[in-house]
Amino acid sequence: MKKQKMRWLPHLGIGGRLFLAFVLISSITILVSVLSAHTFLNLRDKLQLLQQQDIPGLEAAARLNDKSRLIVATAPLLVTAESNVLRQQAMAQLSDAISSMDVLMRNLADYDHYFRELIAQISNSVNLLYQSVERREQLNREQQLQSQRIFPLFNQVIAGIEQLPGWDNDSGKVAVLNKLHYFAGLVEKAANDTTFNQLDYTFLRLEVMEAQINLHLSRAPQRFFGSELQAQLNRLLIIGNRSGDLFKLQNQQLDSRYQQSYLLQNSLDHIRQLAAQVNLYTDSTNERIGNSLKREIASINRNMQSSLVLSLASFLVALAISWFYVRRNVLQRILELQHNMRSIASAKLDTDIRIVGNDEVSSMARDLKHFQNTAIEVERTNKRLAAEIEERVQAEKQLKETQNELIQAAKLAALGQLSVGITHEISQPLTAISSHLHIAGLRLAKGELQAVKHTHSKIASLLKKTGLIIRHLKSFTHRAGTELLAVDIHQVIGEALELMSNRLRDQHCQICYAPSADTPAVLAEPIRLEQVLVNLLSNAIDATQDCAKRDITIKVIPKTDLLYLQVTDNGIGIAPEHLTAVFNPFYTHRESGEGLGLGLSISESIVQGFGGQIQVSSTLGSGSCFTVILKLAEAV
């Protein structure tokens, strides 16, 4: 029964079998991917939880510690600041730090009433400390005012006692003065006492000193009593009394100082409590993060082990398939097939191709066999086509040679039409040379050397003109090359006009042509382009034979990357039905013997060889316009 179920396996072919193996390996890979994805998703969720909850809390805790240290460092400045501006700056920093701490506290997951109370107590202590410092500064200012009043009053009393008349007992006066100086020193000491005990002891001594001063003053002259000096002395002595302002101000100042120390210490204690709570929160958060990371690392390790086991199983399955099936059954046959392909590719078409089995490789072998048969047939066909191509190449070569001969014949035909004018153009300077030679002989006989030199110059000029005509004719009749060059269009037009000058003059044709110095060069072959112009000018002369006024206009119009050369005449024109045939070979309206009708056909072939084109427009009875369109050399 099992064998019957497995009979379908050979019919699957290589693709089906490899597909099954691929499904098996892919299933293992998908399982590994699912495990990895599950691990990564759990890790991502944990990291997002850390990012959203724990890490902001840790960041807030760290910033709280920074703010706590800032408050600890700044709070003493409220007491020790040397100016009110520095004190206000310190208070502003403390207020900003406390507000920031309150905002940061709200980012903590366990933020509750206890933290709010701590922040409120810190804020209250700092505010009370600032108020206490402000009160102490006010007391200092009042004490300074009190001290400023003591010194002038003391000087007045000392001066008054020293100048008091009628006090015969100098020892009593000296004792009073000494006691007053000592009294003044105790007053200054009282202003600088730092404890209540010191202050009580100083005022106790001041009261004893006051009693001694009053005792000595009881023996003063009578005029002292009831005087302004006695009133000043009483005001001075009241300063050193417990009922005076000095004792009250110094007592309040000491009380304010103790209060500042208490408030400062209270603030620092609250900050330390807050820091301790923040540290506890940080430690618990770190512990929670550590435990979570340990769990995730353990999960990753388990999944990694599972992935490694499954990957190893997938590798073993792939290795078994590669070794037992692909290498022994598929690869060997493919290598044999590859060897057959290379043999056929190297023109060994008689290679024997072995077809075994009924799978893709055997199908490829059958296809290769079919290709071999086709290649053999193609080889036979190629040999036949090669022979035909060789025949066509020879025919094309012969056609090209015929076309060149035809172009050369057209040149000679054009020269034949110009032969009379050219003969006249050459014979005229030759006749002049003969005459000048005869004259030179006569003048030489007479010894007129200067006249002979003048005649010699004229002869040289005429010979130069004749040489130019002959060289131009030789250049025009020379076989043109095939290489395209950058050609000056105005130079070519000038040479063509010079070649046609006698015929134009004999036919009384008026040429309208104005060369321009900034016309760009065109891509052409100069001799063939001159032949095109000669053909167009010759046709224009023939077209204007019956006109009373024979005008031929030549225009050069450059545009973007092309140049338009127009030859326009005012002749008889061309009928619309004949416009499409003017460039056909052997098309002509001349009488028999006056032309073959090949000029325009050859001209079109030459211009097309330059990569350009020639166009015609005409109105019957008004004239024709032939336009040669050429490429600019700089655009190529």
Image: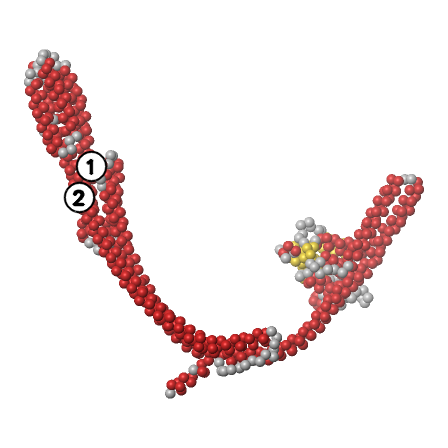
Q: Is residue 509 above or below residue 404?
A: above
Res. 634 image quadrant = bottom right
Left or right placement of residue 384 versus residue 455 in this view: left
Q: Position of residue 347 (x, y in %)?
A: 61, 75
Q: Amino acid at mark 2?
A: Asn
The residue positioned 9% from the left and 24% from the top of the image is 209
The residue positioned 22% from the left and 41% from the top of the image is 75
The numbered mark at residue 266 is 2
The coloring applied to the image is: secondary structure
Left or right placement of residue 144 versus residue 313 in this view: left
Local secondary structure at mark 2: helix
Rounded to the nearest angstrom, the CA distance separating label 2 from label 1 is 18 Å
Quadrant of image for the C terminus: bottom right
Q: Position of residue 317 (x, y in %)?
A: 40, 74
The residue positioned 20% from the left and 47% from the top of the image is 272
Left or right placement of residue 598 versus residue 169 in this view: right
Res. 226 image quadrant = top left
Counting residues from the start of the chain, the first of labels 2 and 1 encountered is 1
The answer to whether residue 614 is visible is: no
Left or right placement of residue 459 versus residue 283 in this view: right
Quadrant of image for the N terminus: bottom left
Q: Which residue is mark 1?
A: 134
Categorize mark 1 by other alpha carbons within 10 Å: few (<14), some (14-19), many (20+): some
Categorize mark 2 by other alpha carbons within 10 Å: few (<14), some (14-19), many (20+): some
Q: Amino acid at mark 1?
A: Glu
